[in-house]
Amino acid sequence: MKVLFITPSRNEISPGAGKLDSIISGINNMGSGFYAEKLDISALDLKDLSLRDVEKIISGIKTGIKNFDAIHTFSIFPFINRDFFDHFLFYSLDFEFLREHFAAFLKNIGNLNCSDCGKTDLPAEELCAFYEKVMHNAKSSDTRPWGNWKTFINGGDYKVKQIFINPHQKLSLQTHEFRSETWIIAEGSGFVVIGDRRYKAEKGLVFTIPKQEKHRAETEDSSMTIIELQLGSYLGEDDIKRIEDIYGRS
């Protein structure tokens, strides 16, 4: 995992930035495929930067901007210039300061591809584990052995996803600790297992799955598309306990 750290600019205040060098050193001493690099913009005034200046700054990154898996920024710089940064962004920012000096740019913070990070005091191993967990849970789409899924809405305590299952496939038999789910069959047909019962699933049918109830979806000759509504206090992708799985993931 490669992480680019961005310092505060000359006219910014950010919590935890004084520990940045030790954080980078700790990550690079870990080994195990982790690497950290710093983009130092501490001498720059963000309000004076032109588009050409931004391009020059980014082109000077040693490893190459496209080679990083994530960016941890102590500056609003990548949010102002989001077109140059399509990475997942972790941010450690002083929002009171930003509201006073950069209020117009705050609307760019808070989408599915970024996360507040108040954990700069963690040891390097724990910080990297935090990065990996957040990035996994914040995915807006993914490909699985049985098909794929994508998130339409992430509302904090509710989420709406589309699940597409290829013919002759099965989701794992699973439970969730913190969320209930409602499945609406939008296209195709197959079967839905809830508890000890197996139901025929056809377009227009709706199935309610309580928290901690085992469940799965299966297909035969047809593919099947499910619209899933999740409700709960925690909606991370890691809230899943696999009981059985034909792909060896249980």
Image (cartoon, rainbow, N blue to C red):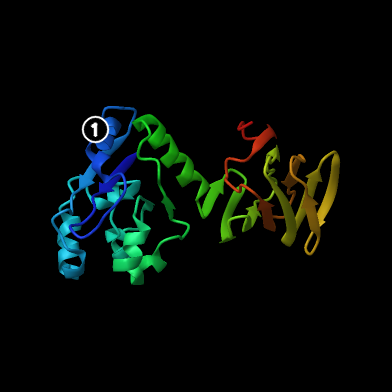
Left or right of 61? Residue 236 is right
When asked about the image quadrant of residue 243, the answer is top right
The C terminus appears in which quarter of the rendering?
top right
**Where is residue 188 shown, x and y percent of the image?**
73, 60
Q: Residues within 10 Å of mark 1 (few under 14, many from 20)?
A: some
**SS category of the residue bearing label 1:** helix
**Where is residue 96 shown, x and y percent of the image?**
36, 60
- Given residues 219 and 80, the one toward you in this image is 80
When asked about the image quadrant of residue 227, the answer is bottom right
For the point 28% across and 31% down, the residue is: 26
- Given residues 105 and 173, the one toward you in this image is 105
For the point 20% across and 69% down, the residue is: 47
- Given residues 63 and 76, the one toward you in this image is 76
Q: Amino acid at mark 1?
A: Ser
Left or right of 240? Residue 4 is left
Q: Residue furthest bottom?
A: 104
Q: Which residue is mark 1?
A: 25
**Where is residue 131 shown, x and y percent of the image?**
41, 41
Residue 92 appears in view: yes
For the point 62% across and 55% down, the residue is: 157
When asked about the image quadrant of residue 106, the answer is bottom left
**Where is residue 136 shown, x and y percent of the image?**
49, 44
The N terminus appears in which quarter of the rendering?
top left
Left or right of 178? Residue 20 is left
- Given residues 29 and 46, the one toward you in this image is 46
Left or right of 75? Residue 177 is right
For the point 77% across and 47% down, the residue is: 210
